[in-house]
Amino acid sequence: MLPRSGAEPLPGTGPFRALRYRNYRLFFAGQAISLIGTWMQRVAMSWLVYRLTLSPFALGLVDFASQVATLLLGFIAGAVVDRTDLRRLLVWTQGLAMGQALILSALTLSGKATFTVVLVCGAFLGMINAFDMPARHAFVIRMVERKEDLGNAIALNSSLFNLARLLGPAVAGFVIAAVGEGLCFLLNGLSYSSIIIALNAMHLAPASSERPQEAALAGIREGFSYAWIRRPIRDTLILLSCLSLLGLPYVVMMPVFAKEILKGGPRTLGFLMGATGAGALAGSMLLAVRKGTKGLEKGIPIVSGLFSAAVIGFAFSPSAGASYVLVALAGFGMISTLASCNTLLQTVVDNALRGRVMSLYTMALVGIAPFGSLLAGWLTDRIGVRLALALGGACCMAASVWFSRRVPLFNKPLFPERERPF
């Protein structure tokens, strides 16, 4: 007889062992379609904004509007996630995201899309994602019962995300060149139906009755205090914030680099983002073959340092070929860092505070990013895209060195495969 969540009775050891769980297989399949559409929309929005404005600052502003809600609503979202049925919440967020994409598609295809329209749609999607992303992270443990498979499930999520990053931008580049941005938005809107169907088809065990009893505001304070006094959680979130603010905006500036430096168009942009996805896919698959989390913290500064060095190299890349290689290395280092940090946090956090800690993770990764996008856009307007990217990469390298010196100070009992139960 299968366990309640649909796991196979025998333990697995391969890189795809989390797929033994029926619920996780449904989630994985639904995301496989939805995420390709998401990446198509990302590329289409960037190209549409740059086509309408020819302004690097406008690119940064749209990215700011689409992500700042994650920072502004992050604490509230964390408290909501810890108090809400996660499947129901995810169905609502996916449905709202579908509506946003279809509206943007209709306006673009009818020739009525303006910079303001894209800005408003981006801001609305950011509000949705403020609740959707921490809910997704916290939902993984509902689909994967055995704690030893949690890291594998997170790595497979990252692999899927980056396979979509590889395919979505490449498809978007051809679609934009042939038809225009509107079709990308339409296909993305339709793709959300796959994850909604998958969520409704799951057979989930009853959720734990362990819910926060304190008032929402007190729960927010408790979550922040919990993360701050635990050095591994605090230092990991600080590193992520630095990378998000100073390093990840290289993706936002890719349209500028594709057009101004490489003298290309939407296909060049698609290849750049696709190469980033290829490197990220390799990094996430490498993590998927890990058998546990022991020693994971020691590898984080290595892969974040690789990411930093690749961004600096990309800034001064002499050709399109070299650029593709360097952004692939940046993608490898980036996803290896993010997935390792995610696994580390999920390993040490208490279940009752999982939603709030994962909301802090989302805030550090996504909520800080819009300020980095604004900063990168402002610097690009003044000193050029090459120097702006190089400066950000150098700051990320400094943060990686700082984190490497913090690892020996981590409180060992917080890390076991360790000694801490879920």
Image: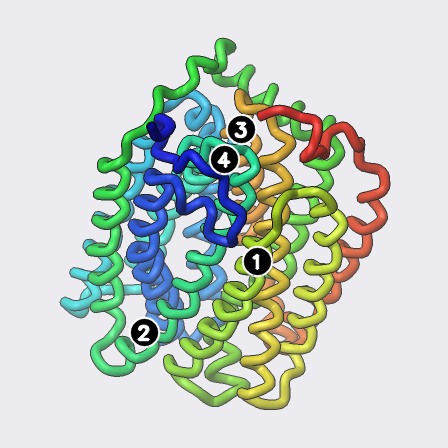
Q: Which numbered disc flags the more N-terminal residue, 4 or 1?
A: 4
User: Residue 247 location in percent, x, y?
Assistant: 63, 61
Name the residue beneath numbered marker 4. Answer: 74
Q: Which numbered disc flags the more N-terminal residue, 2 or 4?
A: 4
User: What's the residue at 50%, 33% (across, down)?
Assistant: 146
Pointers 2 and 4 in contact (CB under 8 A)?
A: no
Q: Which numbered disc flags the more N-terminal residue, 4 or 3?
A: 4
Name the residue beneath numbered marker 2. Answer: 171
What residue type is disc 3 on?
A: Arg
Inter-mark Cα distance, 4 to 1: 22 Å
User: What's the residue at 49%, 62% (across, down)?
Assistant: 60
Inter-mark Cα distance, 1 to 2: 21 Å
User: What's the residue at 63%, 89% (across, down)?
Assistant: 318
User: Residue 403 location in percent, x, y?
Assistant: 78, 49
Q: Dot 2 lies on which element?
A: helix
Q: Which of the two discs, 4 and 1, sits closer to the camera?
A: 1
Frontmost residue, 52 versus 167? 167
> Is 208 placed above or below 365 here?
above
What residue type is disc 2 on?
A: Val
In the image, which disc is placed on residue 354?
3
Q: Which numbered disc flags the more N-terminal residue, 3 or 2?
A: 2
Inter-mark Cα distance, 1 to 3: 21 Å
